[in-house]
């Protein structure tokens, strides 16, 4: 059994070699870019407009358009965000908005703001949670802690989370949750003077 060799006769080839003849129809391509078919079955191969950045996904732009790199939207199974915190917020989760840090907030013989957080101006209801503990090293006299916020109807509200006068030791004085109006500020404060004793407040504000 024999075979017949395939012989190509090459004439004068003028680049670029068209798609119909097995080429790309291009004289140059974008470095590192992905390739896509042309606008017709025989049109020149196309380079995607860009190479994206690390971590981006390639998403369809629909029929008749080149796909592109970008942040995957929620509708496409992503979060629409580029950080974990922003992604959690986009999905409706609670994100830590303010924190006293590991050194806490030293109580004083006076009043003071400890933490604040302003909700987004989006016309929606927001949830805010305050997690609060107080470390007392010398018996307290005074030193009340208060949360101020605006309810969904626009009314200013306050809650005393701790009336002060705590004994020595670490006390988890509050884990409070509130429904808050958009574009308003939630404030955790020391609302009465610590006239005797020594203590440090440790707190976080979480919200969406």
Image (cartoon, helix red, strand yellow):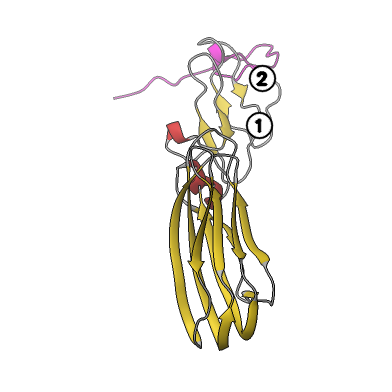
- Identify the residue position indicated by label 2 in the image: 26
| Measured Cα–Cα span from mark 1 to mark 2 | 17 Å
Residue 134 inside the magenta-drawn segment: no
Q: Main secondary structure of the magenta part?
A: loop
For this orientation, the residue located farthest to the left is 1
Residue 20, image x, y percentages: 54, 11
Q: Nearer the viewer, mark 1 or mark 2?
A: 1
Q: From the viewer's side, name the closer residue of 69 and 109.
A: 109
The image quarter containing residue 12 is top right
Q: Considering only vertical position in the picture, is 10 above or below 158?
A: above
Residue 150 vs 45, above or below: the answer is below
**Stretch in magenta:** 1-25
Q: Which residue is mark 1?
A: 50
Q: Choose top left, top right, bottom left or bottom right for residue 76.
A: top left
Q: Horizontal and vertical percent for residue 102?
A: 60, 75
Image x and y of residue 59, in percent: 51, 30
| Looking at the image, residue 82 lies above or below residue 95 | above
Residue placed at 63% from the left, 85% from the top? Answer: 196
Of residues 132 and 30, which is closer to you in this image? 132
Residue drawn where x is 33% and y is 24% of the image? 2
The image quadrant where one finds the N terminus is top left
- Looking at the image, how many numbered discs can be counted on the residues? 2
Relative to 187, 126 lies left or right: left
- Label 2 CA crowd tier, 10 Å (few <14, some 14–19, many 20+): some
Residue 100, horizontal then vertical, whole percent: 61, 68
Q: On screen, 14 above or below 76?
A: above
Secondary element at tag 1: loop
Mark 1 closeness class: few <14, some 14–19, many ≥20 residues within 10 Å: few
Q: Residue at x 52, y 13 (%)?
A: 64
């Amino acid at each position: 059994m024999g075979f017949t060799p395939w012989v190509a006769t090459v004439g004068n080839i003028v680049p670029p070699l068209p798609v119909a003849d097995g080429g790309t129809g291009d004289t140059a391509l974008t470095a590192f870019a992905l390739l896509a078919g042309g606008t017709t079955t025989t049109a020149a191969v196309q380079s995607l407009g860009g190479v994206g950045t690390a971590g981006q996904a390639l998403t369809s732009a629909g029929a008749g358009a080149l796909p592109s790199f970008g942040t995957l939207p929620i509708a496409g199974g992503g979060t629409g965000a580029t950080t974990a915190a922003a992604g959690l917020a986009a999905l409706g989760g609670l994100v830590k908005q303010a924190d006293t840090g590991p050194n806490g907030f030293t109580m004083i013989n006076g009043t003071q703001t400890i933490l604040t957080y302003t909700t987004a101006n989006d016309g929606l209801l927001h949830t805010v949670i305050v997690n609060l503990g107080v470390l007392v090293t010398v018996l307290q006299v005074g030193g009340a802690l208060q949360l101020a916020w605006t309810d969904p109807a626009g009314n200013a509200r306050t809650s005393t989370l701790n009336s002060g006068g705590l004994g020595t030791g670490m006390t988890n004085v509050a884990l409070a949750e509130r429904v808050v109006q958009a574009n308003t500020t939630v404030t955790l404060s020391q609302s009465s003077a610590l006239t005797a004793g020594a203590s440090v407040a440790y707190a976080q504000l979480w919200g969406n």
